[in-house]
Amino acid sequence: MDQEHKILYRSKGVGDVYLYEPHFYKNDTSGKVIIIAQKWFEYPFGGEVFILENNTIKYIGTLDIEGYNPEQDDDQVLTKIVEIKEKGNRLEFSFKSDQLILNPGTDDRIIDNHHLKYIYKNNTLYFEN
């Protein structure tokens, strides 16, 4: 909301999640702020991604991924393992975890992380393996 209490942005609904926790990542060079809203039930299950730039918020998609290490479960949450790089007109989301869970909470496929990443380019967020 702005100073006159006008709604500037309204996000889409996310249902009955237990927690929808925004984490902010700022690029001091471009001025962009990447927001990842970590989603939780009894377990974390990915995050919704937004870009804040020039006082405008844009939803870009979902990172449907989590880290996997049963011995260090709390350290494998998406927002603790994500690395974001901006290269020209594209964003890369890579992950500091040896193993990852794809589609957490629905399909739970555990895979080895061999430089897996999400790419945002030309207004599209996609998974690259």
Image (cartoon, rainbow, N blue to C red):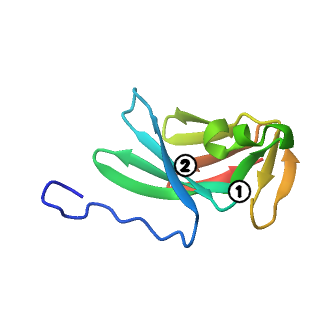
Q: Is residue 1 left or right of residue 15?
A: left
Placement of 75 over or under 15, stated as above or below: above
Residue 9 location, quadrant: bottom left
For the point 79% across and 52% down, the residue is 101
For the point 52% across and 57% down, the residue is 20
Q: Considering the numbered disc 2 on the image, is that residue within a helix, a strand or a loop?
A: strand
Which residue position is annotated with label 1? 43
Residue 49 position, x and y percent, is: 52, 52
**Which numbered disc, 2 or 1, marks the residue closer to the eye?**
1
For the point 47% across and 46% down, the residue is 35
Residue 28 position, x and y percent, is: 40, 27
Residue 125 position, x and y percent, is: 59, 54
Q: Considering the numbered disc 1 on the image, is that residue within a helix, a strand or a loop?
A: loop
* Residue furthest to the left: 4
Q: Is residue 39 left or right of residue 122?
A: right
Of residues 123 and 13, the one nearer the viewer is 13
Dot 1 surroundings within 10 Å: few (below 14), some, or many (20 or more)?
some
Q: Earlier in the sequence, mark 2 or mark 1?
A: 1
Placement of 19 over or under 13, stated as above or below: above
Amino acid type at mark 1: Tyr
Amino acid type at mark 2: Lys
**Residue 123 disc label:** none
Residue 19 location, quadrant: bottom right
Q: CA distance from mark 2 to mark 1?
A: 29 Å
Placement of 126 over or under 105, stated as above or below: above
Dot 2 surroundings within 10 Å: few (below 14), some, or many (20 or more)?
some
In the rendered image, which quarter contains the N terminus? Answer: bottom left
Which residue position is annotated with label 2? 121
For the point 71% across and 52% down, the residue is 65
Residue 100 position, x and y percent, is: 79, 46
Of residues 22 and 121, the one nearer the viewer is 22
